[in-house]
């Protein structure tokens, strides 16, 4: 926990010990001088032997006392090898990248018109975890606009890994969602009763589709009044969409999809409490969770029993297509989440001091404190939400993973530095939101490059200290959230396969939703 100035403070206790030692050493000097005078006056073999033994014992005590301090100092130097001359200034550690005057711009253009959709309804079944659903719901608002449909409040996924029974209004501010988008899309809470029994068009819209695809889908209204969308994720392309559609996506993601009042209120309290304790903090999305490790097949740092447990889980999860995975190959390709130990080495190499306050934005860490201690050994001030929220405050969120993930999302967006250990939906969504809000500092680990360094540490080819720090900083000098345009597809790919490799719109909404200083659009 965070050290606070109080009676019994470790530093105060240490100074008291030093003062007492000084007194004892002074008294010892007096006693030694007195003994010498006595020996000069009346020295006998017995007294000489006795005083010699006493002096020897005192010397041994002093030696052991100081050796303990020296040993502790050496251990700290080994664990925290950086020195003050290597420590970066606060601005380098905590300051946001230079944003070049860029700012959010989400207003529609003059030719933009709201959709009506008075007699056409679209129902949606969202799929995935919180951030996958958020992106999917945002896509479906845009699709409803393109297809001129009334959107019924989406159903949230209740069959994912977390088995969360939360409804839309449990997670999001439903009233705000409807009212804030009334100039874009008509949204209703429920499908009209008279349409519940009529035939529905059940569609799995093609992933990463553009405007022409959905303009073709408009023909469905000739036969149906209701279209049911069975999956919401990745229904829209990342690029090559009209500016107004892209800006609509930003209005939904960064305004309309506000979390429900209970979540927003507690999330703000958590941020305030972190600020009170440490002033500044890192939000670490530590994706060292059971489902992620099982899905990716990553077993570095795990016991044989833990690895086997994850293998069985993967074998028994039907919708996970990959069953046999080579963990070493996954790790070497940078496809594994960083372990708590690796995160500790990484943060230390970036020159963050051991006193840094780190908030763990994640679900239950696999193995609990056994694995988390590998991070705490280097950075003791690790905070979980359970440490800054009362049991009463968290009671309403128990067994509702989407709602607790929303708390982590708020804390992560508001953090001084955000670091994800894996590039999943949460990491991409938070990064995009922080870019939208002014390119707040987000350090994205180069996992493939780091693995090479970690392996050299293990084999003794490299030691922690200045050299490792220089290598890590060089590796990440352009991975700290600086402004850049969204990345396109990987070269050499054709057809729809290339669309899958494009950078997510929600990871980087620049340039459509972020304007330069000379732009008149807001």
Image (tube, grey):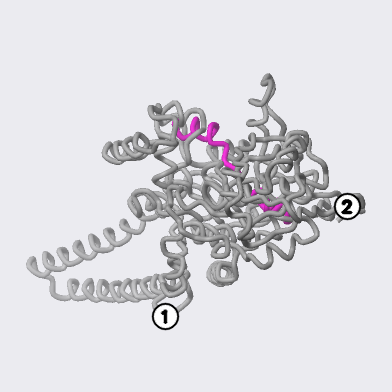
Q: Specify whether residue 441 is painted magenta.
A: yes
Instruction: Look at the numbered disc 2 and give the secondary structure of its residue.
Output: loop
Residue name at image x 43 percent, y 67 percent: 387
Name the residue nearer the viewer: 71 or 174: 174
Q: Tell me residue 439's x, y (percent).
A: 72, 51
Q: Is residue 3 left or right of residue 27?
A: right
Q: Marks 1 and 2: which is nearer the front?
A: 2
The stretch of residues the image draws in magenta is: 431-455
Residue name at image x 42 percent, y 80 percent: 7
Q: Tell me residue 353's x, y (percent).
A: 53, 55
Q: Which residue is mark 2?
A: 517
- The quadrant the C terminus occupies is bottom right
Q: Is residue 479 above or below residue 186?
A: above
Q: Residues within 10 Å of mark 1 (few under 14, many from 20)?
A: few
Q: Determine which of the numbered discs, if any, sits on residue 7 in the image.
A: 1
- The quadrant the N terminus occupies is bottom left
Q: Alpha-carbon distance for marks 1 and 2?
A: 52 Å
Residue name at image x 12 percent, y 67 percent: 50
Q: Is residue 252 above or below residue 266?
A: above
Instruction: Look at the numbered disc 1 and give the secondary structure of its residue.
Output: loop
Residue name at image x 57 percent, y 49 percent: 126
């Amino acid at each position: 926990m965070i050290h606070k100035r109080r009676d019994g403070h470790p530093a105060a206790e240490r100074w008291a010990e030093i003062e007492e030692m000084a007194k004892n050493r002074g008294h010892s000097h007096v006693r030694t001088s007195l003994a010498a005078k006595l020996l000069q006056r009346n020295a006998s073999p017995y007294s000489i032997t006795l005083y010699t033994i006493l002096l020897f014992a005192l010397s041994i005590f002093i030696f052991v006392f100081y050796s303990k301090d020296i040993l502790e100092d050496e251990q700290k130097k080994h664990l925290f090898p950086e020195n003050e001359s290597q420590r970066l200034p606060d601005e380098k550690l905590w300051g946001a990248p230079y944003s070049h005057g860029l700012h959010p711009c989400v207003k529609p253009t003059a030719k933009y018109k709201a959709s009506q959709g008075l007699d056409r309804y679209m129902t949606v079944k969202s799929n995935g975890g919180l951030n996958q659903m958020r992106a999917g719901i945002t896509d479906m608002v845009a699709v409803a606009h393109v297809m001129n449909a009334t959107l019924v409040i989406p159903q949230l996924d209740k069959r994912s890994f977390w088995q969360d029974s939360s409804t839309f209004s449990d997670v999001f501010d439903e009233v705000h969602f409807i009212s804030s988008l009334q100039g874009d899309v008509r949204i209703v809470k429920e499908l009209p009763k008279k349409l519940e029994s009529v035939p529905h068009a059940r569609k799995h819209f093609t992933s990463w589709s553009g405007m022409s695809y959905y303009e073709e889908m408009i023909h469905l209204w000739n036969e149906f009044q209701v279209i049911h969308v069975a999956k919401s994720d990745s229904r829209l392309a990342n690029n090559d969409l009209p500016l107004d559609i892209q800006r609509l996506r930003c209005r939904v993601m960064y305004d309309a999809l506000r979390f429900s009042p209970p979540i927003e209120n507690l999330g703000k309290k958590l941020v305030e409490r972190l600020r009170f304790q440490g002033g500044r903090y890192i939000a670490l999305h530590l994706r060292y969770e059971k489902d992620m490790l099982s899905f990716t097949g990553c077993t570095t740092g795990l016991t044989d029993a833990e690895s086997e447990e994850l293998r069985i889980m993967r074998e028994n999860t039907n919708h996970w297509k990959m069953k046999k995975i080579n963990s070493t190959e996954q790790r070497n390709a940078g496809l594994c989440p960083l372990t708590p130990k690796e995160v500790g080495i990484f943060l230390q190499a970036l020159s963050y001091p051991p006193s840094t306050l780190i908030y763990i934005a994640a679900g239950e860490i696999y193995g609990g404190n056994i694995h988390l201690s590998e991070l705490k050994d280097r950075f003791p001030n690790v905070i979980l939400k359970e440490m800054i929220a009362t049991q009463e405050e968290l009671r309403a969120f128990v067994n509702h993973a989407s709602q607790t993930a929303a708390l982590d999302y708020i804390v992560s967006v508001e953090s001084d530095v955000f670091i994800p250990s894996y590039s999943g939906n949460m990491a991409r969504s938070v990064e995009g939101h922080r870019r939208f809000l002014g390119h707040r500092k987000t350090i994205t680990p180069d996992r493939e490059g780091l693995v090479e360094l970690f392996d050299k540490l293990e084999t003794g080819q490299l030691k922690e200290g200045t050299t490792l720090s220089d290598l890590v900083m060089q590796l990440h000098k352009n991975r700290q959230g600086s402004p850049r345009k969204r990345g396109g597809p990987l070269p050499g790919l054709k057809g729809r396969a290339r669309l899958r490799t494009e950078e997510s719109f929600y990871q980087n909404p620049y340039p459509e939703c972020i304007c330069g200083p000379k732009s008149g659009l807001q």
